[in-house]
Image: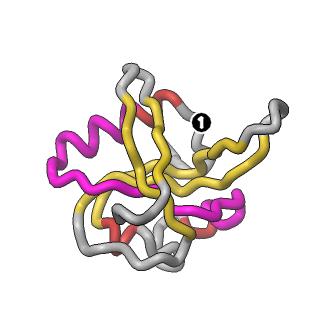
């Protein structure tokens, strides 16, 4: 993942998280981590931004397969084009990060 471009996502807590950015369909390693399905858009200031569609955690190889993702249809219908990911072996750390990010962003495909 280290050759991919990166993006910083900020949690509601003020913590920042560095993610590697991949087009949807890029094979991921079979490893635990956090991920964000997102689309890129141009802001009114002309800058490029990422819009999150779904924030989650789990096995990155499994969760990056949009065809088998439990919210795959929603993610596709909301225009996600990229899979942002980083590894994190700590389940409690992954869950805390997911909660922190979801508290800071509106993600139309997350149900909770």
- The residue at the point 15 percent across, 48 percent down is 90
Q: Nearer the viewer, residue 72 or 104?
A: 104
- The residue at the point 42 percent across, 29 percent down is 11
- The residue at the point 57 percent across, 62 percent down is 82
Q: Position of residue 89 (x, y in %)?
A: 16, 54
In the displayed structure, 11 sits above or below 27; it is: above
Q: Nearer the viewer, residue 53 or 83?
A: 83
* Secondary element at image label 1: loop
Q: Position of residue 39 (x, y in %)?
A: 66, 54
Q: Quadrant of the N terminus?
A: bottom left
Q: Is residue 83 left or right of residue 14?
A: right
In the displayed structure, 26 sits above or below 15; it is: below
Residue identified by numbered label 1: 106
Where on the picture, by quarter, is residue 106? top right
Q: Is residue 75 magenta-colored?
A: yes
Q: Nearer the viewer, residue 26 or 104?
A: 26
Q: Is residue 90 left or right of residue 86?
A: left
Q: Is residue 55 magenta-colored?
A: no
Q: Is residue 103 left or right of residue 52?
A: left
Q: Is residue 24 left or right of residue 65?
A: right
């Amino acid at each position: 993942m280290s050759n991919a471009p990166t993006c910083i996502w900020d949690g509601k807590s003020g913590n920042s998280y560095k993610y590697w950015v991949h087009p949807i369909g890029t094979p991921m390693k079979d490893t635990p981590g956090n991920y964000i399905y997102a689309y890129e858009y141009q802001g009114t200031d002309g800058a490029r931004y990422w819009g999150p569609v779904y924030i989650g955690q789990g096995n990155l190889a499994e969760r990056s397969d949009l065809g088998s993702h439990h919210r795959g249809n929603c993610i596709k219908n909301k225009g996600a084009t990229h899979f942002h990911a980083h590894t994190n072996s700590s389940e409690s750390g992954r869950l805390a990060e997911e909660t922190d990010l979801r508290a800071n962003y509106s993600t139309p495909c997350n149900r909770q």
